[in-house]
Image (spheres, grey):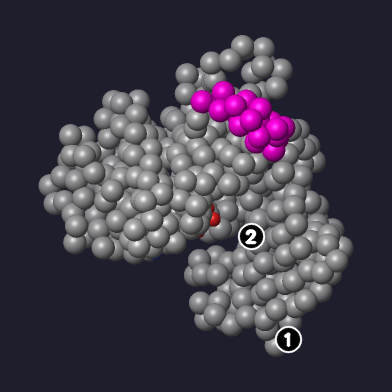
Amino acid sequence: MKILVINAGSSSLKYQLIDMDTQLVVAKGLAERIGMDTGKLTHKYGRDCEEKFVVDTCFKDHTSAIQLVLEALVDKDHGVIADVKEIGAVGHRVLHGGDKFTASCIVDDACKKAIRDCFPLGPLHNPANLQGILACEAVMPGTPQVAVFDTAFHQTMPPEAYMYGIPMEYYKKYAIRRYGFHGTSHRFVSGRAIEILKANGKKADKIVICHLGNGSSLSAVVNGKCVDTSMGLTPLEGVLMGTRSGSLDPAVVECIANNEHMTVTETLNVLNKKSGLLGISGASSDMRDVNKAAEEGNKDAQLALDMWAYGIRKYIGAYAAAMGGIDALIFTAGIGENDAAGRAKVCEGLSFLGIEIDEAKNKVRGEEACISKDGAPVQVWVIPTNEELAIALDTLALTEGK
Ligand code: ADP
């Protein structure tokens, strides 16, 4: 069976068509500038999706974008399937499931209503995610659809981990609490970690997952269940990221707003889009550029790297304390999978916890590998994430036989 995975944003739509027999991506692409005067579809296909073709067009809405995606998939020159009916089901990434979803679910009226109910929690993403679902319903009626929530994996957190120390009425009235994000990645990677560790005869009860990409989050996973995570009500909380500040004293918001004559929304925009590695280094939000700038002597870039690693290290310590120990530490996502120096820096000084990186093993990039010293008490691994495959696997499991 082939499954189409959709990640719909407000003005863009990413897709992957995955063959579930081989678990390989047969085509993928991006529709950009939906709802604007000019739009563009970039469709990749062929071996390792290295062939591509681009269509300049105008997407009136998400439905016209999905329509063109389907046309590209069956195109006689660049297509990868003969008929849209070969797509057995569609899996949608949905940002916020609030406390309504602890797992993925088949899209029906109740599911769509629940996604709508979560609009206030994910005001930028959830409406767009729902647009993607409605567009697929319109263009491929009868094809089963599944919603996979970024927040679902974290729903096992206990109240002491998810509540904020604010008046209870705000939780009751507005559902203000920690939800956490990147849940599909944390679930996929922790599941794989448990599999590998058990196969190697290692303990896998208490694991810390470091999902370090442009957006970054950590989670503490006990016996396969999330007990804490670093992102909060929104993805702004937690460690320093590409453009996000991560956690800070909320009074900073008032101070910036007053001094810069900005609204709270404008100030949060700065904390989300102009802070983090970008804000401190002044060079870039991209870790490769920040590394290069630091190598070339840019002191602010070096400070950004130091802050990045220090913040992550503190979370690892906190989660080891929260779990009463740590059996394994896992690195994933763009930086976690590729940046050996970053991983080494995060783990500096953590030998008191049993975390010791092997310099030679740590040279690995983008592949599954153990990077801790032989005999070190804590297993440290790089495990590549694959959120699209995780979404496709959930979609298959929920729709098979339907
Ligand atoms: P997201 O999905 O959150 O947009 P990714 O998981 O794709 O982000 O990660 C992007 C980050 O990974 C960027 O900061 C990029 O610089 C970093 N990255 C990718 N390759 C390397 C590398 N070889 N060394 C250091 N950082 C890398």
Camera-nearest residue between 166 and 390: 166
Q: Residue at x 24, y 54 (%)?
A: 371
Q: Cα distance, mark 2 to mark 1?
A: 22 Å
Residue identified by numbered label 2: 5
Secondary structure at badge 1 equals loop
Q: Residues within 10 Å of mark 1 (few under 14, many from 20)?
A: few
Secondary structure at badge 2 equals strand
Task: Give amino acid for label 2.
Answer: Val
The image shows residue 286 at horizontal and vertical percentages of 48, 58
Q: Please determine whether, in this image, residue 380 is positioned above or below residue 229.
A: below
Give the position of the C terminus as an image quadrant. Answer: bottom right
Residue identified by numbered label 1: 76
Can residue 215 be found in the magenta stretch? no
Q: Residue at x 48, y 56 (%)?
A: 283
Q: Is residue 378 left or right of residue 252?
A: left
Camera-nearest residue between 199 and 276: 276
Q: Quadrant of residue 175?
A: top right
- Tell which residue pokes out farthest to the front in this image: 259
Q: Please determine whether, in this image, residue 265 is positioned above or below residue 20.
A: above
The image shows residue 108 at horizontal and vertical percentages of 76, 44
Over which residues does the magenta segment extend?
Answer: 249-267
- Tell which residue pokes out farthest to the left in this image: 375
Q: Please determine whether, in this image, residue 42 is positioned above or below residue 344.
A: below
**Could one spot residue 197 in this view of the protein?**
no
Earlier along the polypeptide chain: callout 2 or callout 1? 2
Main SS, magenta region, reads: helix
Q: Quadrant of residue 250?
A: top right
Mark 2: is the Cβ under 8 angstroms from ligand 1? no
Q: Residues within 10 Å of mark 2 (few under 14, many from 20)?
A: many
**Could one spot residue 3 in this view of the protein?**
yes
Q: Residue at x 31, y 32 (%)?
A: 317
The image shows residue 338 at horizontal and vertical percentages of 37, 61
